[in-house]
Amino acid sequence: MSARTHPARTRSRQLAPRLAGALAAAVLGASGPAYADPSKLAAPIAHNYGEQETARQTAMAGGLRALGNSTAAMFQNPASMPETRAYHIEGVVQLMPEAARHLYGGAVVDSMTSRLTGGFAFVGGFIDKDGLDRSLIDARLALAYPLSERFFVGLGGRYAKIWERGLGEFGASKLSGGLVDPDGGRFPFVSAFTFDAGITVKATESLHIAALGQNLTHPGNALLPTMLGGGIGYGTNDFSIEADGLADFDSWGKTTGRFMAGGEYLVGDHFPLRLGYRYDQGAKLNWLSGGLGYLGREFSIEGSVRRSVSSPGGTMVVVSLAYFLESAGIGRGSDAE
């Protein structure tokens, strides 16, 4: 259990709108100026290694493979979805001003109505609309099952597709804008089905250990790199901390590592405060991250910022809004309140 899943004990009808405005101003104001030429950013930075994130993940520097239950687990480790009984719908906005990157989507995860947990996520958007003009879609379907009270397995299928209507430095080619479609436009230069697989072990009620592989069909590019890694997390009702590590086999022409650590503390049963640090060996970048939010009984709103502290990195801003269907008794049967 972690601060993310701790139920709030009271409701606030007036606080949430005020907090939403404060969060939006804080995260957007922290993004800083954009670079003049987004195409000069390395593809793994502009595309975030093909990874999608909720606000909680971003604030903790991407380190949630062990404690990232519910919708966060859809994107990082499907085996962690059953860790808590939940039925969540979450919408996400991801922004990277330096790359003119705007992504919108969400996820649904149900670990309430069946022992077999299921989830679906979809994210779409564009990068550098006035230059490279890349568009992408990322659809995922995941299943997880608790083999025991302390051992979970998960499998997540994924389809990713990326088009480019502008011209990169290689012109219209498979390396850049995609080959020209005789019927008009261009063929996508990435169109692939792949999958993730993971395990999560609850060594104790508070100590969780995860191991997983991502993009295991080996698409062989920096936009869907094959990665192996895991994490160790310790979480209670009000506090959690986790450290993760990943080996990336494709993004930089050699195996490189990314190392992430983050922590969160729940203040007054409603307000999660989060901090994180990330080192990217391939890009040789250090990142700092932080976030805050409001957790109610029926919904949450959260915002996060991750910023590189060395050049030529960037800023990632994520805002999430979630609704907790279990708060309305869905999936509880006789246990409904």
Image: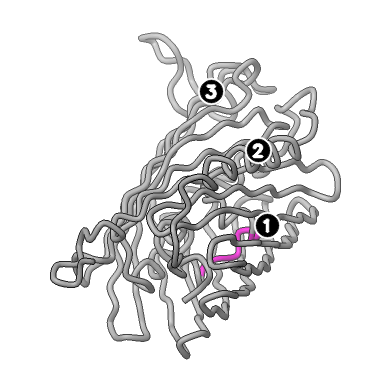
Measured in 3D between alpha carbons, the distance from the residue under mark 2 to the one under mark 1, in whole angstroms, is 19 Å
Going by the numbered disc 1, the residue's amino acid type is Lys
Q: Is 260 in front, or is 171?
A: 260
Q: Residue 238, relative to residue 306: is it above or below?
A: below
Residue at the far left: name it.
334
Q: Residue 127, relative to residue 24: is it above or below?
A: above
Q: Residue 126, relative to residue 130: is it above or below?
A: below
Looking at the rendered structure, the secondary structure element under dot 1 is loop
* Quadrant of res 222: top right
Are dots 2 and 3 in contact, CB under 8 Å? no
Is residue 226 part of the magenta span, yes or no? no
Measured in 3D between alpha carbons, the distance from the residue under mark 3 to the one under mark 1, in whole angstroms, is 26 Å
Disc assigned to residue 164 = 3
Residue topped by disc 2: 46
Residue topped by disc 1: 254
Q: Label 1 neighbourhood size at 10 Å, few (<14), some (14-19), many (20+)? A: few
The magenta-colored residue range is 60-65
Q: Residue at x 51, y 46 (%)?
A: 320
The percent coordinates of residue 53 (x first, y second) are 53, 50
Going by the numbered disc 2, the residue's amino acid type is Ala
